[in-house]
Image: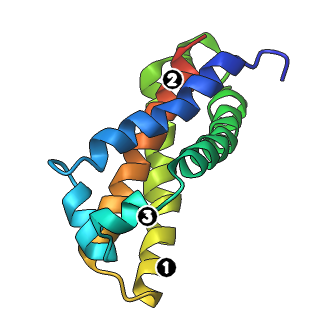
Amino acid sequence: MENINWLALVVASLSTLVVGFVWYHPKVFGTIWMKEIGMTEEKAKNSNMGLTFGLSVVLAFLVSFFLFTIVFMGGPPEMPHGSPEFMTFKHGAAHGTMLGLFVILPVIVTNGLYEQRSFKYMMVVTGYWTVAFALMGGIINGWT
């Protein structure tokens, strides 16, 4: 744990906001997402965005720390993930993508089924988290 690049973890956490600003932009998936959850512009303006963004970054930091443990401490004995050949953006992004597809997708879809959400909603949210986790993993693993 003495080799933690705390700055990389912070930048990876902040990258979720950048991905969110692009992903949920009205010209990308923002309009679809708002329609699917019944959000209006007026309702959005009444939220406490400072609190929302602040807590989002704190929670993303928890994820970045978890991703750090996966990309640095994972792997079988013959392929330890902290070794130089695994210290690439691509390797970290692969782990983030796997986390999105094999953890986030089942969780979002299961919740969406019980909440009777649309397939569009489930795919927009799952897609966001998969892309965000891939970028986070790449930043954490590639920034050595």
The quadrant where residue 68 appears? top right
Q: Is residue 51 above or below residue 46?
A: above
Q: CA distance from mark 2 to mark 3?
A: 22 Å
| Residue located at (70% from left, 36% from top) | 65
Identity of the residue furthest to the left in this view: 27
Residue 77 as seen in the image, left or right of residue 9? right
- Amino acid carrying label 3: it is Leu
45 sits to left or right of 50: left
Quarter of the image containing the N terminus?
top right
For residue 111, the mark is: 1
The crowd level at tag 2 (other Cα within 10 Å; few <14, some 14-19, many 20+) is many
> Mark 1 or mark 2, which is nearer the start of the sequence?
1
Q: Report helix, strand or loop for mark 3.
A: helix
In x, y percent, where is residue 123?
A: 30, 64
- Mark 2 vs mark 1, CA separation in Å: 29 Å
Residue 99 x/y as whole percent:
52, 50
Q: Quadrant of residue 17?
A: top left
